[in-house]
Image: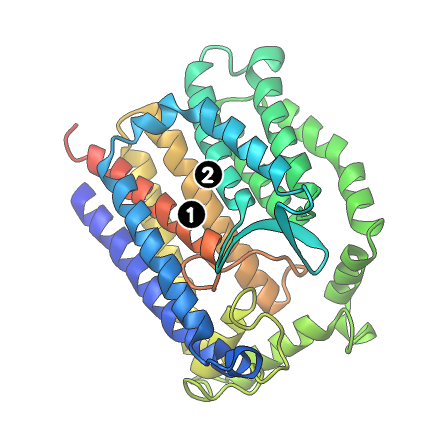
Amino acid sequence: MVRKTRINLLTVSIVLICIGIIMIYSSSSIYAWERYGDSFYFLKRHLVFLAVGLLFTFLAMIIDYHIFRRYARPLFWIALILLVLVLIPGLGREISGARRWFRFKFISFQPSEFANLALIIYIADFVCRKEEQIKTLLKGFIPPICALGAISLLILLQPDLGTTIALGSVVLIMLYISGVRPRYILGLILCSLPMVYILVFSVPYRKARILAFLNPWLDPKGSGFQIIQSQIAIGSGGLFGVGLGHSQQKLFYLPAAHTDFIFSIIGEELGLFGTLGIIILFLIFIQQGLKIIKNAQDKFGYFLAQGLVLMISLKAIVNIGVSCGVFPTKGLPLPFISYGGSSLIFDMVSLGILINIARSGEYP
């Protein structure tokens, strides 16, 4: 049964990755030709990232996943250092006012993606080490919240509120399941609401995104442009779509068509059945992930798998929700499908760790 779960999870992930390869070329070829004179520009880079991801996935599958627990704290400190370094002018690359990337020739690296994985590993290790004290405030709740706060603050400085909220949600859910008293978590959330309000409404572009989410037609050529074009793309696809490669919205109407809004292009070219297919694949991924969590042979594997499944699931839900206009615009990629080097690589590493944890459950 566990072997079947591993095969199902791997098969679903491979299908999603293959869909991503096709849709990245379909959604980016014209833009790539216009900007770089090479319609395969983004596809070739994506295949390089995929090759790197496959290497790290293989390593994550074959090593003993308990080694991540041994290096949980060093990984956390490395993540903190990288998040500090990326904010330094000359080291971190700034794009559209956001300093989130290291640039090495043609390869970009986003340390927040590494920080997501490192913090999940750290929290999984922490709740195992503090099992008997997890219900206490000083030793069971405050230390992991301080770790989350340090990572979140540095990600916010990039700035990247979407990733911060997603990571915070994953950590709080992990702590709740580990046995942290609900009143501590509820108290933290209530205390955080004023800060979230300030972070959203004191920054013009974030405020504009919220207003555009509530009524995109208030500013159809400005803050509401992306969400309007996204909904036009999905709506014009109908049941069966306009055909692979025949999207009109990717012709410089819908920004980030091959990254944040690739789901919208899928809806336009493959129609309702195409989008439902993607959603079903992610539901199967979540289902198989839950089986791995249930069958984990130790608490570290249980909580680590829990965090990884939560993060991938949350990113998929938010990305699809943003494309459909259910959530305000956030810069979260669609796992395994969207173009993006760091996100793809670390999603694949997470997949490798999940398969590793599942494999350990074959021999109880």
Query: Residue 322: percent from the left, percent from the top?
Result: 61, 63
Q: Is residue 353 visible?
A: yes
Tell me which residue sits at (30%, 44%) in the image. 352
Query: Residue 220: percent from the left, percent from the top?
Result: 77, 77
Q: Is residue 275 visible?
A: no
Figure check: 275 above or below 186? below
Query: Residue 60: percent from the left, percent from the top?
Result: 30, 40
Q: Secondary structure at mark 2?
A: helix
Figure check: 64 above or below 202? above
Q: Report, in whole angstroms, how far the alpha carbon at label 1 lies from the one at label 2.
A: 8 Å
Residue 249 falls left or right of residue 199: left
Tell me which residue sits at (45%, 81%) in the image. 39
* Disc number placed over residue 346 in the picture, else none: 1
Residue 160 falls left or right of residue 349: right
Tell me which residue sits at (80%, 57%) in the image. 207
State the image quarter where residue 129 is shown.
Answer: top left
Q: Amino acid at mark 2?
A: Leu
Q: Amino acid at mark 1?
A: Phe
Quadrant where the image shows the C terminus: top left
State the image quarter where residue 221 is shown.
Answer: bottom right
Q: How many numbered marks does the figure carry?
A: 2
Query: Residue 4: percent from the left, percent from the top?
Result: 18, 49
Figure check: 218 above or below 170? below
Q: Secondary structure at mark 1?
A: helix
Tell me which residue sits at (26%, 38%) in the image. 356
Q: Which residue is mark 2?
A: 117
Residue 257 falls left or right of residue 46: right
Quadrant where the image shows the N terminus: top left
Residues tagged 1 and 2 counted as in contact (Cβ below 8 A):
yes
Choose the circle earlier in sequence order: 1 or 2.
2
